[in-house]
Each structure stands twice: as C-alpha cells, then as structure tokens.
Amino acid sequence: MECVNAMNKSTWDAGRNALALSKSERRMMNKVRDKRILVTGAAGFIGAHVVRRLLEDGFEVVGVDNLNNYYDPRLKDARLRKLCIGPRFWFFPLDLADKERVESLFHDGEFEAVVHLAAQAGIRHSLTSPDEYVASNLVGFVNVLEGVRACTCRHFVFASSSSVYGSYNKIPFAEEDSTDYPVSLYGATKKSNEVMAHAYSHLFHIPTTGLRFFTVYGPWGRPDMAVFKFVDAVMGGRIIELYNFGRLQRDFTFVDDIVEGIVRLLPLPPNWDGKQGPGAQAPMRLCNIGNQQPVQLLHLVRTIESCLGKTAYIRLMPMQPGDVYETQARVDKLKEITGYSPHVSIEDGIGRFVAWYLGEYLPLGLTESPQFPLPLPVQSVHQNAPASIAGEG
Ligand SMILES: NC(=O)c1ccc[n+]([C@@H]2O[C@H](COP(=O)([O-])OP(=O)(O)OC[C@H]3O[C@@H](n4cnc5c(N)ncnc54)[C@H](O)[C@@H]3O)[C@@H](O)[C@H]2O)c1
C-alpha cells in the first residue's frame, strides 16, 4: 500500500489506487514504529482533530479514509492539509470494506493502538442508503477487528454513538441502560459494533473501549449536522425549522472535549482478568462521552444569532414522530477512568465554531459548489430547504 503524506497532493492522488507500501516507505515507517497509532476516518471531522492532537503529543500517526462523498470531500481534503500536517503523519486512501487492503495495512503497520472512527455517519441517510452503512459500519468494522486481532495493538478504541439508546427515555443515558431497541439502521450498526467488538475482545483478549459520542460539534465540523446547518441557514437567510416548538434538547459536545477523552483513554486499556472460557470477563468497556448539559434548540439558535450578529428566520413546528425529546449523557464512568469530563459550554463552543466558519471555512469557497450539499434523502434537502436537526449521529 502506498503511503501518502497529507502535504503532497500529487503523491496522494497517485496513492488512491496503490496496493502496498513501497520498501522505502516501509523502512521509514518501521524506524518510528514506537507509539504508532492508526486513526481510521482520519479525514473526517473527529478523526482529523484526533490526528492533530496525537501529532502534537509526539505520536507517529497513520491515517486512513476512503474520502467518500457523503458530504463535500474537499472539506476532508482541507482538514487533512490543515490539521494533519507533519512528517510523522502518513495518510492512506483506503476503503475499510476492502478486506485485502485492510489486511495489508495491518500487516505493514504494527500499531500500538487503533482509534477506529471511520463509519458511514448520519441517521437520515441510513433510511435510503442502507448499503453504505452495511459496507462501512459492518463489513469495514469486521475487517478492522480482524486486523486488530492479527496485530499486537494494546488498545482498540472505536466510535459508537448515543444512537444506540434509540428512543429510550430515562434521562440521563447511562452505559448500563437498555440499547436493545435502536430506532435507525445507523444506530443498529453502532449497536452491532459494540457486540461484535465484545465477541472479539472475549475471544482474542483484545483490550477494547467503545465510546458513545453525543452530538459532536466544532471547527471543521460536518455540514450535515445541526450547528453547521443552522449557521449556514442564518448566513444565507434561510428558514430554520425547530421541531417540538424549539424545545428539543441535545447534549452538544465540543470536539476538543471528545479528543481529550480519547487521548486520555488510549494509555488506559481495560485489563484482562486472565480467565478463559464462557464465564470469563472480556477486556472491554463502553463509555458515554457527552457534555452532560443538554441545550434547547431554540437556545442554540439564539446563541448562533448572537455570535453572528444576525437574526435567524425560525419556523416552530410540532413534534415529529420518531424524534427524541432529549439526549443527555452520564459520563461518570469516563470520569472515573480518565479523571476527565467534557466542559466546553455551548456559548464558548459556538463562538469557536463561528470564528472558524467565518475565518477559515468561507474563504475555502466550498459553498460556491453547485454539487454540494449532496442531496440528503427523505424530504430531500436542497440548497434552499429549511435547516432542521435530523441527520445527526
Ligand atoms: N459527529 C457526531 O456527532 C457523532 C456522534 C456519534 C457518533 N459519531 C461517530 O464518530 C465517528 C466519526 O464521526 P464524524 O462526525 O467525524 O464523521 P465523518 O463523516 O466526518 O468522519 C467519518 C470518516 O470516515 C470515512 N469513512 C466512511 N466509510 C469509510 C470506509 N468504508 N473506509 C474508510 N473510511 C471511511 C469518511 O470518509 C469520513 O471522512 C463515526 O464513527 C461516527 O459514526 C459521530
């Protein structure tokens, strides 16, 4: 597999179809294999932030991503160039559903830890494009598990989601609550990841942590998510539709808080009790990672207005069937393990998002594209459609 440094565009393009590391690249990577971490979904929103932080902390990072076009891939490209720059970062354009290439990646890699963030995200999209979720979140996930099984990775950390709680309505959500009834295919694939990871952890003693993320936002965020869509709508003078008359609450979590949780967890894998067989405890845990401070959507919009100095056009709508009133994480478990819980307030976080949006995102010129945002399914979202909360995850 050819390795591509994020700085070098022509090499990167050439690497898209490559199958194996060249000898010189393998030599170079082997020199620095101490503290080498694999980040999947490295060009994604959370992945690029994780890569940046790991590089700052002195790790060697290998990033993979298939750069799919669920949303504008130029944003992924820009993230890699801005956040993942450095001689200790190696990028491989790779589809995790491609078993052979994933085998080759793990064979060549010798990763100390794996942070698996690549997935087909988004709840709405899973209603009309189930195959993409099966390929990335199920087939890709098993391929990664097989890779982790074959290497000497000391900690496998993967992204789950608050979506596993479905319409469970005891607030706040705690890890031991029922997750047997997800209400979207996306949520079902995340639940599947948790149980498949448990089986591998049990069988092969792989130290594993699954993190249930709660509505992550921040600079370099995803254009299909509420904060980005609402800011776009206010800037473009478009209507924002708020269901349940704006009284839905979401536990918005700033991306730096998520990253801090991940980097603190990495050196703290769950221990294996050394027992084997059916009654043995797998070295695996699941942890919520959320802000514990649910925010009403109306308050979110008012905060955006005040940061932008512009008025939003709001249409208050009744509750939609299938929607959940509130999400809120209980993060005591994460705090107990790492000593850390997220703390960035919505006012601070939105201020930082808006500063990025105005100062870095708009100058990229991506909003000029006729192709994006890509049509999202269900009551199709087009350029002038109202912005609403659906599609998180
Ligand atoms: N952002 C949130 O609020 C949130 C909430 C809950 C869970 N999550 C989970 O966190 C992880 C990261 O989410 P994100 O918000 O950064 O999303 P993202 O879409 O920005 O990042 C995911 C990346 O994975 C890549 N990818 C998808 N399928 C792939 C495949 N088959 N092979 C290789 N790369 C592939 C995509 O190109 C993308 O760059 C995902 O697993 C997501 O489900 C995110």
Image (cartoon, helix red, strand yellow):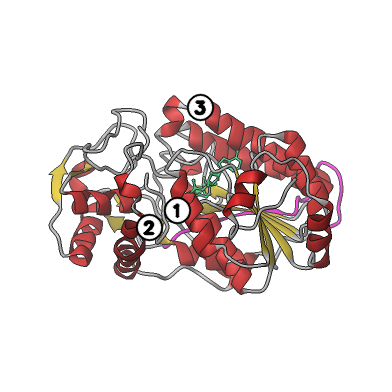
Disc 1, SS: loop
Disc 1 + disc 2, Cβ < 8 Å: yes
Horizontal arrangement in the rendering, residue 366 relative to residue 195 (left or right):
left
Given residues 367 and 121, the one toward you in this image is 367
**Cα–Cα gap, marks 3 and 1:** 22 Å
Q: Tell me the crowding category of disc 2: few under 14, some 14 to 19, or many 20 or more residues within 10 angstroms, Cα based.
A: many
Residue positioned 25% across, 43% down in the render: 387
Q: Amino acid at mark 1?
A: Phe
| Highlighted magenta segment, given as a residue range | 273-291
Q: Amino acid at mark 3?
A: Pro
Residue positioned 30% across, 46% down in the render: 368
The CB of the residue at mark 3 lies under 8 Å from ligand 1: no
**Is residue 145 in view from this perspective?**
yes
Q: Nearer the viewer, mark 2 or mark 3?
A: 3
Horizontal arrangement in the rendering, residue 205 relative to residue 37 (left or right):
right
In the picture, the disc for residue 214 is 1
In the picture, the disc for residue 130 is 3
In the rendered image of this protein, does residue 153 appear above or below residue 166? below
Disc 2, SS: loop
First-in-chain label (3 vs 1): 3
